[in-house]
Image (cartoon, grey):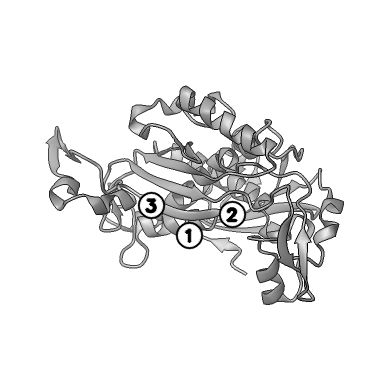
Amino acid sequence: MGNSFGKLFKITTFGESHGKAIGVIIDGCPSGLEIDEEFIQSELDRRRPGQSKITTQRREEDKFEILSGVFEGVSTGMPITIVIANKDQKSKDYSHIANQFRPSHADYTYQQKYGVRDYRGGGRSSARETAARVAAGAIAKLWLNKHGISFNAFVSQVGEVKAPEYHLMDLSQTEWNIVMCPDQPTAEKMIALIDSIRKQCDTIGGVVTGVIQNLPIGLGEPVFDKLHAELGKAMLSINAVKGFEYGSGFSGVAMRGSEHNDEFVKEGSEVRTKTNNSGGVQGGISNGEDVYFNVAFKPVATIMMDQDSVNDKGEEIKVSGKGRHDPCVVPRAVPIVEAMAALVIADFYMMSQTANLP
């Protein structure tokens, strides 16, 4: 299984949704980094379930324990192991699907590939695993913050409700509401929509926009390891993600080259671009402008109504949704998107140490 991500700043996650714990091993973190445990916990709290009426009511504190790689609050350069205990599993909620395949879940494919599957909450395929990524991403952020690099993600769309472009909003207000959208009028519409969908026992999808600022010029390793390619891989590895675009994305196909080209200008001693349709990446390499991208999340597959399916004997059946699930995953996906972006940038930043960067 593909449980590892990264080349120099590398993580390996482990654990299942209803096992004793989940966790991550981080290999490649530089020595001498002050490990701020309060910051790591605050990042996990942003992803934690049970925060509001529009998220799953599973109650996990997501308290973590560092087992290795840190001594007296500082990284030693050795692998850092972080464990997060599972406390609020209700495995009985899944006993009815032990031999059934839920529509649009990984049940069928895992069973066919491995011949066995942990049906409790989806086992390894559960989004519960992403808490380990957030913990690792927090450490990547701690290191990158020392270099002035910042990460901001927010919910930019739920269903048909869309927020303004990121540069028209104050991203510092993202955390001010339960839907993680920095535009309050839009946030209120999103919350109302999600709550309405929840009461209908259904689910809805959405988009998380990520913005990376203050990147140095030169991050990215062409030809096959372009910056945007690795960001795409990182985002598409997140549960429920169905699409990724950066810069002008798919809307750029309707533009002419004369409209789309980002013309260069000189601002003091710096070379900048008048526009940023490139999304901060040209030739697979960061150009110093904001890197921004959109990540599309499908509606959560578990819905509280009967659906047609089959069981492991090939018999046609009705599957009933039970348990505690998000009516819309995007509010809790915001810190996951930031974490995966931080892991990508940390890896590329390490690679850049051998390149011609200031």
**Residue marked by disc 3:** 245
Q: Please indicate whether residue 240 sits to the left or right of residue 244 in the image.
A: right
Q: Position of residue 166 (x, y in %)?
A: 37, 34
Q: Residue at x 66, y 42 (%)?
A: 326
Question: Which residue is at the front of the view, 247 or 148?
Answer: 247
Residue 8: mark: 1
Figure quadrant of the N terminus: bottom right
Q: Earlier in the sequence, mark 1 or mark 3?
A: 1
Question: Which residue is at the front of the view, 19 or 189?
Answer: 189
- Spatial distance from mark 1 to mark 3, Cα to Cα? 25 Å
**Is residue 33 placed above or below 321 in the rendered structure?**
above
- Spatial distance from mark 2 to mark 3, Cα to Cα? 17 Å
- Spatial distance from mark 1 to mark 2, Cα to Cα? 24 Å
Amino acid type, callout 3: Glu
Crowding at dot 2, Cα within 10 Å, few <14 / some 14-19 / many 20+, comes out as some
Crowding at dot 3, Cα within 10 Å, few <14 / some 14-19 / many 20+, comes out as some
Helix, strand or loop status at disc 3? strand
